[in-house]
Image (cartoon, rainbow, N blue to C red):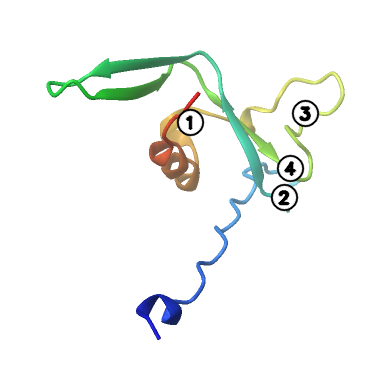
Amino acid sequence: MTSQENTPPSAKPARIPCPFIYANGRTCAGYVVRFEVYKADLSWTTDADGAWNFQFRPRSHFHVFCSDKGNHAGFRRQDPNTLKFWFDTLPEEIQQIIEQTNPPPP
């Protein structure tokens, strides 16, 4: 039996709770299923060894979407500010996902 066979299967990633809070103070029971950034600068540059590096810098905010209510806006309403974040105000779990993401090959 190898050490790999003794390793428990990796657990599913934890769901990120929806950050929306209703006017009555109740938190949304949903979870984050998508987030988007608008007005982002993407660039590829070479380092001293000639290796290409990808950089991502948002110039605007991120939108977070919920499993239960999407953007929580409803019909013909603006997206609520409680689901708009600057990078440093995003839930930590989302910041980690973004920081660990590499661009996919074309």
Q: Tell me: 77 left or right of 91.
A: right
| Image position of 26 (left or right of 8) | right
What whole-number distance in Å separates the C-alpha atoms at marks 1 and 4? 37 Å
Give the residue pinned by disc 2: 30
Q: Mark 1 against mark 4, which lies toward the viewer? A: 1
Q: Residue drawn 70% across and 48% down? A: 25
Q: Which residue lies under the disc numbered 3?
A: 73
Ranked by sequence position, the earlier of labels 3 and 2 is: 2
Amino acid under disc 2? Gly
Front label number (2 vs 1):
1
Q: Which residue is mark 4?
A: 22
Up the image or down, 71 lies above or below 4; here it is: above
In front here: 61 or 97?
A: 97
Asked if 70 appears above or below 42 in the picture, the reply is: below
Estimate the spatial distance between the alpha carbons at disc 3 and disc 4, rounded to whole Å. Answer: 12 Å
Query: x, y percentage for residue 39?
Result: 51, 13
Whole-angstrom CA distance, mark 2 to mark 4, is 12 Å
From the image, state whether disc 3 or disc 2 is nearer to you: 2
Residue for badge 1:
104
Mark 3 element type: loop
